[in-house]
Amino acid sequence: MLRGEIGLHPRPFVVAVTGAAVFALGTVASSVAIRWVIDHVIVPRFEEGSVAVTTVLTGIVLIVSIGLVRAAGVVCRRVFAGITQWRIAGTLGEQVTDRLLHQPISWHQRRPDGDLVARAGVDVDAAVAVMAPIPFSVGTALLIVVSAVWLLVSDIVIGLVAVAVFPLLIGVNVVYQRRVDRHYTDAQDHLGTLSSAVHESFDGVQLVKAYGAEQRETERLSAIAGSLRDARVRAVRLRGTFEALLDVLPSLTNVALVVVGAVRVDAGAITVGDLSSYVFLFTLLVFPLRLIGYVVSEIPHSQAGWRRVRTVLDEPVEPDPRGRIAPAGGALAIELDDVVFTFPGETRPTLDHVGMSVERGRIVAVVGPTGAGKSTLVELIGGLVAPESGRVAVAPGTTALVFQEAFLFSGTIRHNLALGRDHPDDELWDALALAEAAGFVAETPHQLDTVVGERGVTLSGGQRQRVALARALLLRPDLLLLDDTTSALDPATEGAVLANLRRALARATVVLVASRPSTIALADDVMYLTHGRIVAHGSHAELMAGHAGYRDLVEAFETDRADDDADARVTVAGGGGD
């Protein structure tokens, strides 16, 4: 993990480690300076009653100079450690986001949106959390080595007492890391699950409220949050025990140093300055040793985030389904030859050996019962999914696809139409007029600059569909794919929209999934799809006369539509209902 992260921005990390090393060496030097001052200034002052001014000035200069060097090392280490951490976070976030953008729609459909957002956000933050203290811990490791050598060289007895605690601390760290690692991994996984569940709940807030499922959602999210809490509590409990040991061991060692040092001073083996410098140095080591403990405690958390980030970055980018689409030749706009498509995990093909040809400039309606594969057929032609086998060919040109569930961003109508492209206002209004949306947009408070709210919540379903259709028409597509796009429109508005399309897109090809008989009748050709196969093809009148299954389906559509219209009239007459 550390090698992979440091490799992203090695230069500021090296500078931060250099600053930490300067601080470490300065810390050892400060204990040497303390010994010199005690032995040459303080003790002679008590024993002899006076000390030379030059000796005092030398001690002052020595301590101040070492202090300034240590301060410079701290500033360098902190500044560049922070730079390293946030540059790595920025790079990782960009890499994850870039990988998510390059994965095709079919890849995203198999994964929860909230979990992917977590990997680009909280998991990246967790992965880099350990980077800021790492330079200090490297400097501390150097400090421990240099201090141990200096203590052992100065006095073997005192050195052994001080150095003996280091293996104990390392052992505590290793045991802690092994035990806490799984808890932090579990916590990070639960965090991704919670993010996904919250994202899903917010997306379905209208459904939740409409069905009175607030309590159910509260219980579901509470259960996930409880699992996250339990995993973190277990990790924090271990961390508390670990930090308590880090407090006790250095304190006991300091007591031992004082006791053993007093005996050594009494025996004349070391001076008072020596003992003071040893205790002073070990006291200075306590906080860095605590920081090493902090780093070790953060490593499992960061490793959990790093693993979740790497699962996204290490997964190969799946081929773009659009790359599987061949160019259609001659007068054909669309050609499908023996196409098979099966959703992952399913055994029955959604599209089973489908073949169809559509000439340029034709309006083709795709009709079939629920689950027949109509939306999948449109997504195949649009290049959102790739066929399992067979050939999909589309004439070169611009393709626009409008889904039944029209998605709008929370920005303005202008933003939702242009999507960052530069279009003059007259082009935006023309597209809105073709979609029969110019009227209601003109009545909004700020017209094109009206904010529609998250997912277009301030607009009705039919208004959202018309804005989404206008967005597609703004591209002046050569191929327009409509997945039951006008289902929320009344028959008169739908007829006007289709008439506009026929007039404005005279040379374009339109493929529309339709369930309204009036819409189907406006198409030049009809593809009747059932059980994943096109079982009939022809004009609406021909299929009504010659195919019983198609006729029964369309008549069922007509009956359902009549029932819906009757229900609407009753609701209006009754004052809107409850």
Image: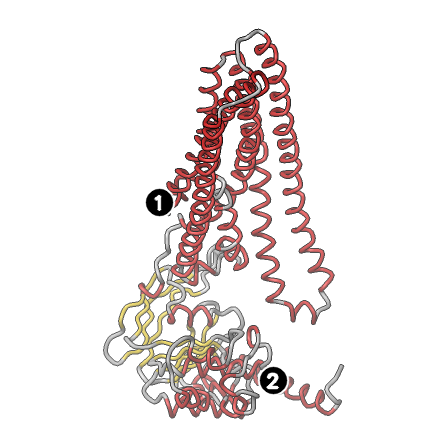
Q: Residue at x 33, y 79 (%)?
A: 358
What kind of residue is marked 2? Thr
Q: Find residue 461 and report its horizontal and vertical position in percent.
A: 57, 80
Q: Is residue 267 left or right of residue 21?
A: right
Q: Is residue 525 above or below residue 14?
A: below
Nearer-the-camera pick, 72 or 365: 72
Whether residue 50 is visible here, answered yes or no, is yes
Residue occupying image coordinates x 35% and y 70%: 355
Q: Looking at the picture, which amino acid does disc 1 mark?
A: Arg
Q: Which residue corresponds to the image point at 42% horizontal and 69% vertical from the top-left?
A: 379
- Asked which quadrant contains residue 271, the reply is top right
- Label number found at residue 126: none
Residue occupying the far left of the picture: 330
The chosen color scheme is secondary structure
In what element is the residue under mark 1? Answer: helix
Q: Secondary structure at mark 2?
A: helix
Using the rendered view, name the quadrant where residue 559 is placed: bottom right
In-image side of 108 versus 571 (left or right): left
- For residue 1, say whether it is visible: no
Q: Quadrant of residue 266?
A: top right
Q: Which residue is mark 1?
A: 11
* Viewer-side residue, 173 vs 291: 291
Q: Nearer the viewer, residue 191 or 245?
A: 245
Residue at image coords 43%, 37%:
69
Reading the image, the residue beneath label 2 is 559
Could you tell me residue 123's position as x and y percent?
Answer: 51, 50
Distance in Å between CA atoms under marks 1 and 2: 72 Å
